[in-house]
């Protein structure tokens, strides 16, 4: 019961759904994600830490920056089922596609921290 509650609470905000779908197949550093979501580092980090603590994401510090990624093989059964369900319904959603394109543009433009 606790695992389900923790996981569903972690996914209860749109930004967190967008983050897990963006990081499902790629890693990104906080500075890139700040540009994609036009969000301050402190607010974005709060969402990333919530997802990490719920077992959806892993982070790694490299130099000044934290990189976040999802290891789908390491997800708990509850998180895997939730991710599969969300991905089936939202992967082709225009907002998710826009996030992926924006991340690609940010990477091409920035190349300063990563």
Image (tube, rainbow, N blue to C red):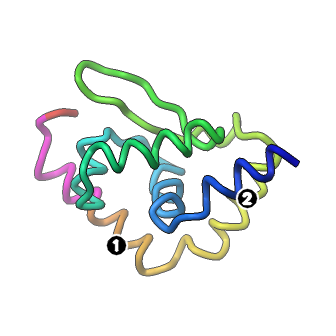
Give residue 82's mark.
2
Task: Establish if 6 lies above or below 61.
Answer: below
Where does residue 94 sit, x and y in percent of width and height?
42, 81
Where does residue 81 sit, x and y in percent of width and height?
78, 56
Question: Is residue 111 on the magenta stretch?
Answer: yes
Using a 10 Å C-alpha cutoff, classify the residue at mark 1 as few (fewer than 14 neighbours), some (14 to 19) or many (20 or more): few
Q: Mark 1 sits on what residue?
A: 98
Q: Nearer the viewer, residue 32 or 101?
A: 32
Residue 75 relative to residue 29: left or right: right
Residue at 53%, 33% in the rendered image:
58
Question: Is residue 28 on the magenta stretch?
Answer: no
Residue at 21%, 49% in the rendered image:
107
Residue 45 is drawn in which quadrant?
Answer: top left
Residue at 27%, 59% in the rendered image:
36
Where does residue 67 sit, x and y in percent of width and height?
38, 33
Q: Nearer the viewer, residue 81 or 111?
A: 81
Task: Establish if 58 lies above or below 8.
Answer: above
Task: Establish if 24 lies above or below 49.
Answer: below
Q: CA distance from mark 1 to mark 2?
A: 22 Å
Magenta region, residue range: 103-112
Residue lying farthest to the bottom in this orientation: 94
Where does residue 13 sit, x and y in percent of width and height?
53, 64
Kind of element beneath mark 1: helix
Residue 17 is drawn in which quadrant?
Answer: bottom right
Residue at 71%, 61% in the rendered image:
84
Using a 10 Å C-alpha cutoff, classify the residue at mark 2 as few (fewer than 14 neighbours), some (14 to 19) or many (20 or more): some
Residue 44 relative to residue 7: left or right: left
- Quadrant in the picture for the C terminus: top left
Kind of element beneath mark 2: helix
Our reading of the magenta stretch's main secondary structure is: helix
Q: Earlier in the sequence, mark 1 or mark 2?
A: 2
Q: Are marks 1 and 2 in contact (CB under 8 Å)?
A: no
């Amino acid at each position: 019961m606790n695992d389900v509650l923790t996981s569903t609470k972690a996914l209860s905000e749109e930004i967190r759904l967008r983050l897990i779908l963006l990081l499902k197949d790629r890693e990104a550093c906080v500075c890139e994600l700040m540009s994609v979501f036009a969000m301050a580092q402190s607010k974005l980090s709060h969402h990333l830490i919530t997802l990490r603590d719920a077992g959806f994401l892993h982070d790694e510090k490299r130099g000044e920056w934290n990189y976040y990624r999802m290891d789908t093989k390491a997800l708990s059964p509850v998180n895997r089922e939730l991710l599969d369900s969300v991905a089936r319904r939202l992967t082709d959603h225009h907002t998710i596609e826009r996030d992926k394109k924006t991340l690609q543009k940010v990477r091409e433009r920035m190349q300063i921290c990563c």
